[in-house]
Amino acid sequence: MDVFSGESIVQLFSVIIGVYALYSGIKGDGGAYKNSYPKELQEPIRKILRVTYLIFGVIMTVGGVLDYLKVFGEAANEWVVWCYTGLGLIVFVVYWIIIKVKFGKQMK
């Protein structure tokens, strides 16, 4: 496999995004946590966001590595990409729903 092929770059990018999300979730600091929520909501939302980044980071890192190693075979490779990308998107949709349900009235 060519390291600089389009497929390898996507896999590498997925792993880099996953590792950054894990780092951000563990550290709990950085640009990802800058928002315009009211001060009293900053801490509870930060905790939920940390968990979100940890889950997203694991999905993207593991998905990128499985994709690169072709653990499920060449034929399933595209399916693997769609699965971990879709799961990553679902994680942030769930985060958004939790924030709106839990803090929606306080944010208006």
Image (tube, helix red, strand yellow):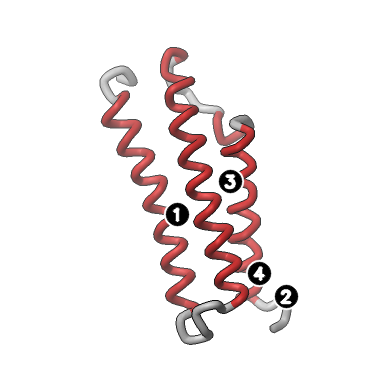
Quick check: 90 above or below 72?
above
Q: Quadrant of residue 5?
A: bottom right
Quick check: 100 above or below 54?
above
- Residue 29 location (% of width, % of height): 62, 30
Where is mark 1, residue-wise?
88
The reply to whether callout 4 and callout 2 are in contact (CB within 8 Å) is: yes
Element type at mark 2: loop
Amino acid at pointer 4: Ile
Report the residue that reaches farthest toward the front.
71
Q: Nearer the viewer, residue 72 or 24?
A: 72
The 10 Å Cα crowd at callout 1, few under 14, some 14 to 19, many 20 or more, is: many
Report the residue that reaches farthest toward the bottom.
75
- Residue 26 location (% of width, % of height): 60, 37
Q: Which mark is residue 9?
A: 4
Amino acid at pointer 2: Phe
The 10 Å Cα crowd at callout 3, few under 14, some 14 to 19, many 20 or more, is: many
Of the two numbered discs 2 and 1 on the same chain, state the one appearing first in sequence: 2
Element type at mark 4: helix
- Mark 2 → mark 1, Cα distance in angstroms: 24 Å
- Write the residue at 57% across / 65% down: 64
- Indicate the quadrant containing the N terminus: top left, top right, bottom left or bottom right: bottom right
The 10 Å Cα crowd at callout 2, few under 14, some 14 to 19, many 20 or more, is: few
Where is mark 3, residue-wise?
21
- Mark 2 → mark 3, Cα distance in angstroms: 23 Å
Amino acid at pointer 3: Ala
Amino acid at pointer 1: Gly
For the residues carrying marks 2 and 1, which lies nearer the camera in this image? 1
The reply to whether callout 4 and callout 3 are in contact (CB within 8 Å) is: no
- Indicate the quadrant containing the C terminus: top left, top right, bottom left or bottom right: top left
